[in-house]
Amino acid sequence: PQTRSLLGVFEEDAAAISNYVNQLFQAMHRIYDAQNELSAATHLTSKLLKEYEKQRFPLGGDDEVMTSTLQQFAKVIDESCHAVLSTQLADAMMFPITQFKERDLKEILTLKEVFQIASNDHDAAITRYSRLSKRRENEKIKAEVTEDVYTSRKKQHQTMMHYFCALNTLQYKKKIAMLEPLLGYMQAQISFFKMGSENLTEQLEEFLTNIGTSVQNVRREMECEVENMQQTIEDLEVASDPLYLPDPDPTKFPVHRNLTRKAGYLNARNKTGLVSSSWERQFYFTQGGNLMSQARGDVAGGLVMDIDNCSVMAVDCEDRRYCFQITSFDGKKSSILQAESKKDYEEWICTINNISKQIYLSENPEEMAARVNQSALEAVTPSPSFQQRHESMRPTAQSRPPAARTSSTGSLGSESAALSALSLDSLVAPDTPIQFDIISPVSEDLPGQAKSSGQSGRRTNPFGETGGSKSETEDSILHQLFIVRFLGSMEVKSDESPDVVYETMRQILAARAIHNVFRMTESHLLVTCDCLKLIDPQTQVTRLRFPLPNVVLYATHQENKRLFGFVLRTSGGRAESHQTAICYIFESNNEGEKICDSVGLAKQIAFHAELDRKASEKQKERERVKEKQQKELNKQKQIEKDLEEQSRLIAASSRSNQSSGEGQFVVLSSSQSEDSDLGEDGKKKRESE
C-alpha cells in the first residue's frame, strides 16, 4: 500500500506536468500559427512562466532555481520583439515540446495501462493459485497455475520497474522540455530581428549561455541516472527471481519463529450468507499488540483485532491451504486468514503467539512454554483443571503436609522445593479478599496521628494527604517519578521473603483473568526519602501515601520486569493490637527494576539520615547532661562560698562581743542559757541552722 500510495503521488505529478505542458504547448502553438497574435501569445507565455511558482507539484525538486530561471525568461520574453519566422519557431521551439508531449507523455500513459493490466493479471493468477485444492492435488494443474503466477508476477515486476524508471526520468525531461523551447524561442528572436545591440545585451547572452549549459548538465545527469536505474533493474531482476514463486524453497528462505512484528498480504474470509463466504486479499500488519489491515487505496490501516492474550490455531477451511484462525481473549471475535506460502503461514502463527505470550506469567519456564501453546481463552477462563490446580496447590489440614513453593526461576523438578520453607498458606492469609481499586490504607497515618487529629478537631483529607506532606516532599533529597498502573492488593501473612510478592502477583493476575477484570488505574508514583506517593496524573492529588519505614519488602517479577510490588506493614487490621501486612502490586512501563532500585536508594538515604539524627540526639543529650552537671557544680561552689562568708561574719561578731563585754554583766535569756548548757555541740548546730 505504501508503494502504491507513492506511485499515486508520482502519477499525480505526471498529470500535473502533462496539464502544464499542454497549456504551454498551446501557448507556443499560437505563436507558430498566427504571427499577428504573436504579442498576445508571448504575453500569455510570459504569464504562464510567472505562475510557475504558484504551481504545486508533488515532487517539486529544485523549484526555487526553476522559478527564478523562468521568471527571468518571462521578463525577457515580455520585453522582446514579437515577430519570428515560422520555420525557426517550428525547428527551435515547437519540435522539442511536441516531441515531449507526443512521445514522453504518451509513453507514461501507455506504461500506466500496461502496468494496470499486469497488476490485474497477477491478482487473477494469485486468486487461481489460492483456490488450489488441498485434498485433490493435481500436479499438472498446480504446475500450470504456478507457472502462471511466476509469469504474471515477473511481468508485473518488470513492467513496474520500467514504469517507475519512466516516471523518474520524467522529472528531468520536464525541465528539458520546458527550457529547450524557450531557449529556441530566444535564439529565433536573436537571429530574426538582429537587435542584439539594442535588446540583447551581454548580460542576457551570458544568462542564455548559462541556461544552455544547465540544460546540458541536466541531460547528462539524466543519462547517468537512467544508466544507474537500468543497472539496478537488472540486479533486482536477478535477485528477485526466486521471490516470484508463491511458495519459495524453505531451504533458501528459512522460517523465522522469533518475530514480534509481521506484515504481508493475507486472504481474509468474509461471510456473505448463512453458508456462503467470500475471500478478500488485503495487507495485514501488527502494530502495538494489534492486528491491522489496509485495503488497496486506503490511506492508513484499520484495526482488525487486539491480539494481546488471544489464541491462534491452524484450521481447515473450504479446502484451502495455509489457513489459520485468530480468536480474541473473550471468544467473541475471530478471523480466518489464509497465507500465501507455508513460510508466511508459520511465521504469522509464531508472531501472534510471541505477541500474545508476553502477558502470560507462570511459576517456571516449563509452565510458561505450556501456556504459550494454549489459547488465551483457556488461559483466562475458569475451568475445572484450573480450579483443581489451585486446589492441589493448597494442602489439606489433615493428611498432607504444607507443600513448599518453588521459585519462579526454578526448574520443573520439585526436589529442590525444600529450599523454600514457606508454603502458600504461610505466605498469603486464607480467604483474603483481593482489592482491585485504590483505597487508602488504615495504617497510612503515622502512629498516634489518629488520636492527635481527633483531639485537635482537624478534618481528615479523603485523598490521604497530610498537612506536612508538601514540606516533607520539598525537604526530601530524592525525587523520582514513575508511571504505574495499580493491579491489586491483598493481605499477606509474612513479609520476610520475596516469595510473598511473587505469590501475590500470581493470585492477583489469576483473579483478574478469572473475573475478566482488565481495567487498571494509572497513577504517578513519587519516590522520596520519606514516603511513596500515588498521585493522580490529571488533578495532581495524592491518592495514597505509604510511609517509607513501613515498606518492609519490595521485589520485581523475575520473568516480567514490568511487574513489581511491595509489602506495607500497618498497625491495626483485624485487631487493633495486631500488625498486618498488605502487598500492593503494580505494572510499570518496563521500569520495575528501576522503581525497586529507587525505593532501595530511598531507604538507604532514610537509614543514614536516621543514624545521623540519632547521633545528633545523643550528642545533644550528652551536652545537656554536661551542662546540668556544670550548673550543679557551680551551685555547690556558690553554697560553699556563702557558708565561708557566714562563718567569717560569725567569728568576727563573736570577737567583738567578747572585747566589749569585759567588766560588764551580761543578762542571759533563757534561750542563751540553754545554749550554754548544750555546750560546744549545741552552738555549732545553731550556727549551721
Image: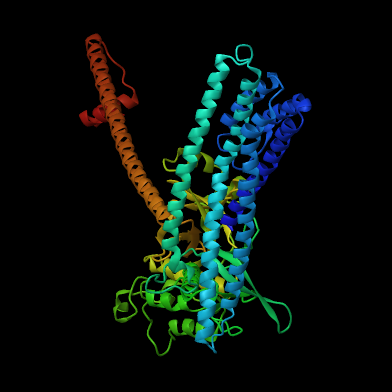
**Side of 240 relative to 116 (left or right):** left
The residue sitting at 33% across, 38% down in the picture is 616
Is residue 432 visible in the rendered image? The answer is: no
Relative to 350, is 124 on the left or the right?
right
Q: Is any atom of residue 161 visible in this view?
A: yes
> Which residue is farthest front?
87
**Way the structure is coloured:** rainbow
The residue that appears at 69% across and 36% down in the rendered structure is: 24
258 and 26: which one is in front?
Answer: 26
Q: In this orientation, which residue lies closer to the viewer: 374 or 141?
A: 141
On the image, which quarter does residue 275 sit in? bottom right
Q: Position of residue 461 (x, y in %)?
A: 61, 49
Vertical relation: 678 (above or below) 291: above
Residue 677 in percent (x, y) is at 25, 30
Left or right of residue 31, residue 113 in this image: left
On screen, residue 335 above or below 227 = below
Name the residue at 70% across, 19% down: 81
Query: Looking at the figure, which quarter contains the C terminus?
Result: top left
| Quadrant of the rendering where the N terminus is positioned | bottom right
**Residue 21 in the image: x percent, y percent?**
67, 39
> Where 429 sits versus 104, above or below?
below
Which residue is more in the foreground, 318 or 336?
318
Give the x, y percent position of residue 389: 47, 83
Q: Nearer the viewer, residue 512 or 191?
A: 191
In the picture, residue 256 is in which quadrant?
Answer: bottom left
Total labels: the figure holds 0
